[in-house]
Amino acid sequence: METLRDAFDFRDFSKAEQIILVLFSIFLLIFPWLGFGSFVKTVMIYFLLFSLFGMGWNTIGGYGGQVELGKAQYVGIGAYTVSLMMVWWKIPFWVSMPIGVLIALGYSFMIGYPLFRLKGHYFAIATICTSLVLQDIFINWKLVGAAKGIELPIRDHPDFLYMQFKSDTYYFYFIMVLFYVALFYMNWFRKSKLGYQLRMIKDDEEAAESMGIDARWCKIKAYSIASAFVAVGGGFLAVFNLYVDPYSVMDLDLSIKIALMAMLGGAGSMWGPIIGAAFLIPLDRFLGSWLGGQKGLIGVDFMIYSAMIMIVSAYQPRGIWGIIEQFRKRGA
Amino acid sequence: MIVLDAILQGILMGLLFALVALGLTIIFGVMDIVNFAHGEFLMIGMYTAYWTSLLLHVDPLIALPASAAVGMLLGLVSYYWLVKYLIRGPMIAQLFGTFGLMLFLRYLAQFLFGTDYRIIQKGLLVGKSLSLGPFILDWTKLSTAILSLLSFLFVYYLLHRTKLGKALRATSLNKEAAAYMGIRTERMNAFAWMIGGGTVGIAGGLLVNFWYVYPTVGLLFVMIAFASVAMGGFGSIKGAFFAGVIIGMIELLFPVFGHLIGWDFLGPHFKFTLVYFAYFIIVVLRPQGLFGWKH
C-alpha cells in the first residue's frame, strides 16, 4: 500500500513541474485525435518508447552512476523472445513478453555478477563487449534467422492477443500505458531504499560500503531492473515493426542512443530521460527525413547530433535538466 | 604447418594492433581518459593515405608521413577543443565526450566520402607476396609489420630516453608532483594526444594497404585496441605491445583451431567475438592486466 502511495505521490516536485506533468498527460491522451499524420504518430511512439528505455537506463546509469553502454542486448532479448515464440509456437504477445523479461532478468544477473567487479572505464567497455558478443552470435545463428532477421507472421484480423492492429493509435495507447507504468515505478524507485543506496554509491562508493551497503549487489539489482524495462520495450518494438534483425535491435548505436538520451536530458533526475527523448527523437527523425533523404547529405543529421553531445558533455555534464535547475536557482 | 602459418600471420597482424593500442594506452596513462574516438583517428589516417596516394599518384607508403601529420593534428585539435574541457567534468561526461567525437568523425567521413568500401588497387607492394619456404607472406603485411615495429620502437625510445618522454612519464605517474617539478602538465597532455594521434595515423596509413576503408572501420579496431590495452594493463606500453601481438595470434589461430577440431561453426566470422570475450574475461579476472601498474 505504502509502495503504491509513494508511486503516485508527486507532491515533492515543484508546482510548475506538476502542472507540466498534468498538461503533458492530457496532451498524450488526446494526441491521436489531433489529426497528425502517421509520421508524427510514429515519432511520438518512438519518443515514448525511448523514454521507457531511458528511464530504465536511468536506474543504473543515472542514479547508480555506472556508465552502462550495453542496453541494446536487452532490447534484442525482448524483441527476439517475442518474435521467435510467435513464429515457432504461435504464442501470444502477452505470454511471450513476460517470458522475454524473465530471460532478460536471468541473463542480466548472470552477466551482472562478473560485470560489477569492474569500475569506471573498464566497466563501460565491458558492457559494450557483452553487447557485441551477443550481437555477433545472433548475426551468425542460423536458427534465429542470422543476419537476415525474422519477420513476424501477420494475422488476418487485428488481434489484441498478438498485438496486431490496423492503426498506430492502438500502439500509441499501449506504449503510453507502459510509459506511465514506468513513470510511476521510477517515482517510487527514486524514493525507495535501493534508490537512496544507489545515489550514495554514486557519490562515494567506499563510504557507502563502510555504511554496510553491499555496493555490488545493489548495482546488480539496479542493472536487472534496467534490463527488464528495456526488454519490455524490446518486445514492443518487435510487434510494432513486425520485423527483427540483429542490426536494428542489438546495435551498439542503439545502446549509445539510450544512454545518451538520458545523459543529455539529465542523468539521475526524474525528468531527464523524458526530456532527452523529447529532444533527440524528433530531432533524429526529422533531421533523418529531411537531410538523410537528400542525396549527398548522408550523415549530416548525426554530425549535428554528435556535435551537441560534445558540447553538452564539455559544458554541462548534467544535461538539459542541469541547465534548467541552474536557471531556477538563479531566479530564486 | 597450418598452425605455424597462422601464428606467423598473426604476429604480422598483431604488430599493427600493437601500434593502434599504443596511442590509446599513452593517452590513458597520462590522462586517465579513454579515447573512444581512437578507431576514428585510425579511419581518418586510412582515408588520408588513400586520398593522398590516389590524388598525387604516389605509393601509399610514401603517403605515410601525411597520415602521421594528420593524426597528430587531429590529436592536438581534439585535445585543445574538446578534451581540455571534458577533463573538468565527471567520468561519464568524458566518456560521452569522446564518444561524441567518435560519432562526429565517423559521420563526417560518411558525409565527405560516402559509405563505399574503398581499397588501394595499385601500389609498390599491393598484391605481391614473398615465399619463404612453405610460407607465403604478403609484402603489404610484412612491410606493415616492420614499419609498425619501427614506429613502436621509436615511440618507446622517445618515452624512455628523451627528456620530453621522461616528463610525460612523470606526468602519468603523478600529475601534481610533476607540476611541482616544473613540468607543464597541460602541455604534456597535449603531447600525449599528439603522439596518440600520430601513431594511430601511421597505423591507418599502413593498414590501408591491405584493408578496406569505410567510415565505420574504426569500431572493430578500437575494440581490438581496448582488448589489447586491457590485456596489457591500462597505461602500460610494453603490455600493449605484447597484448597486441597475442591478440593478433588469437584472431588467426582461432578459426584454424576450430577447423582442426571439426567445429567449423567457430569459423572466421567469430574471431572478433573472441576478442571481445577475451577482453571481458581478462578485465574480470585480472583488472590490472598482464603488465599493468595502474588501475
Image (cartoon, coloured by chain):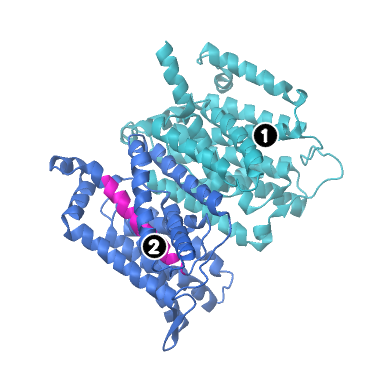
Chain colours: A cyan, B blue
Mark 2 falls within which chain?
Answer: B
Compared with residue A8, is residue A238 higher up or lower down, i.e. above or below?
A: below
Q: Position of residue A71 (x, y in %)?
A: 54, 44
**Nearer-the-camera pick, A131 or B159:** B159
Question: Residue at the location (28% across, 57% down)?
Answer: B236
Q: Secondary structure at mark 2?
A: helix
Say which of marks 2 and 1 sits in front.
2
Residue lying at the far left in this picture: please name it.
Answer: B181
Q: How many marks?
A: 2
Q: Residues within 10 Å of mark 2 (few under 14, many from 20)?
A: many
Residue B119 falls left or right of residue A97: left
- Which residue is labeled 2 in the image? B203
Identify which amino acid the numbered label 1 is placed on. Answer: Val
Identify which amino acid the numbered label 2 is placed on. Answer: Ala
Q: Determine the main secondary structure of the stretch shown in magenta.
A: helix
- Which residue is labeled 1 in the image? A43
Q: Quadrant of the N terminus of chain B?
A: bottom left
Quarter-of-image position of residue B79:
top left
Residue A16 magenta: no
**Nearer-the-camera pick, A243 or A82:** A243
Residue lying at the far bottom in this picture: please name it.
Answer: B133
**Nearer-the-camera pick, B173 or B51:** B51
Q: Position of residue B211 (x, y in %)?
A: 49, 66
Q: Which residues are magenta?
A: B189-209
Residue B195 magenta: yes
Residue A143 falls left or right of residue A216: right
Quarter-of-image position of residue B206:
bottom left
Q: Secondary structure at mark 1?
A: helix
